[in-house]
Image: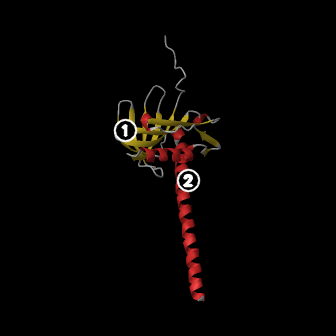
């Protein structure tokens, strides 16, 4: 009888330790997304030069590149460089989900929002106001920014997007430069 109790006790301990290990693995994989976004943001001041891969396509005003750093959970990542009067401007994009199920896309959007909002980078926090996606709207976006004292991060924006494309819903994360707010006037030339 003592042998049976020992086996039962050891089996129970083994079972609970597996469940804890599985929970820790799931927790770690969620945190990997946040750590990966921090790495992308850290490379922002150099126009993502440390994570830029091979050229995909060159257009008259922009060039698309593969990203040689894949964010945890992303289907694909790319970098676009734009040429213009103000020099080189770059953006980084990750396609996080493609699905025909709006509720699944909405759930992913909310999960990514929770991981990006209040993300600490260089002792500053990304902040964005959540907007709940509505299927009829076909496009929802949250723009995150820093209350930055660091000039190199003042224009940095991280945007979370849920949009309908043909028959699919896509969830994307984009890191880019934004010169001015949409309601801000540009230069007046007479």
Q: Residue at x 53, y 59 (%)?
A: 26
**As drawn, is 66 to the left or to the right of 158?**
left
Other residues around mark 1 within 10 Å, as few (<14) / some (14–19) / many (≥20): few
Q: Quadrant of residue 135?
A: top left
Q: Residue at x 52, y 40 (%)?
A: 44
Residue 154 position within the rendered picture, expressed as x and y whole percent measured from the top left: 59, 33
Residue 5 circle label: none
Residue 165 circle label: 1
> Contact (CB < 8 A) between labels 2 and 1?
no
Q: Residue at x 39, y 36 (%)?
A: 63
Q: Residue at x 53, y 64 (%)?
A: 22
**As drawn, is 55 to the left or to the right of 132?**
left
Residue 184 position within the rendered picture, expressed as x and y whole percent measured from the top left: 55, 22
**As drawn, is 61 to the left or to the right of 45?**
left
Residue 157 position within the rendered picture, expressed as x and y whole percent measured from the top left: 54, 36
Q: Is residue 157 visible?
A: no
Residue 118 position within the rendered picture, expressed as x and y whole percent measured from the top left: 61, 43
The residue closer to the viewer here, 188 or 89, is 188
Instruction: List the residue tagged with mark 2.
Output: 31
Q: Quadrant of the image for the N terminus?
A: bottom right
Give how far apart the Cα atoms at labels 2 and 1 are: 29 Å
Instruction: Determine whether the residue tagged by mark 2 lies in a helix, strand or loop.
Output: helix
The residue closer to the viewer here, 3 or 155, is 3
Instruction: Determine whether the residue tagged by mark 1 lies in a helix, strand or loop.
Output: strand
Q: Is residue 98 above or below residue 82?
A: below
């Amino acid at each position: 009888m003592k042998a049976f109790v020992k086996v039962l006790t050891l089996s129970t301990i083994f079972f609970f330790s597996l469940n804890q290990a599985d929970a820790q693995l799931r927790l770690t994989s969620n945190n990997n997304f946040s750590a990966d976004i921090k790495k992308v943001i850290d490379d922002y001041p150099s126009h993502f030069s440390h994570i830029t891969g091979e050229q995909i396509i060159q257009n008259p005003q922009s060039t698309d590149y593969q990203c040689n750093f894949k964010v945890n959970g992303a289907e694909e990542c790319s970098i676009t460089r734009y040429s213009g009067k103000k020099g080189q401007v770059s953006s980084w994009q990750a396609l996080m989900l493609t699905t025909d199920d709006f509720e699944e896309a909405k759930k992913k959007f909310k999960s990514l929002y929770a991981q990006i909002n209040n993300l600490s980078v260089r002792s500053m926090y990304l902040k964005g106001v959540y907007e709940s996606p509505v299927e009829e709207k076909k496009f929802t976006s949250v723009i995150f920014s820093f209350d930055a004292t660091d000039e190199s991060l003042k224009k940095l924006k991280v945007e979370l997007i849920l949009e309908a494309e043909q028959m699919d819903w896509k969830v994307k994360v984009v890191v880019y430069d934004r010169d001015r707010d949409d309601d801000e006037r540009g230069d007046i030339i007479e």
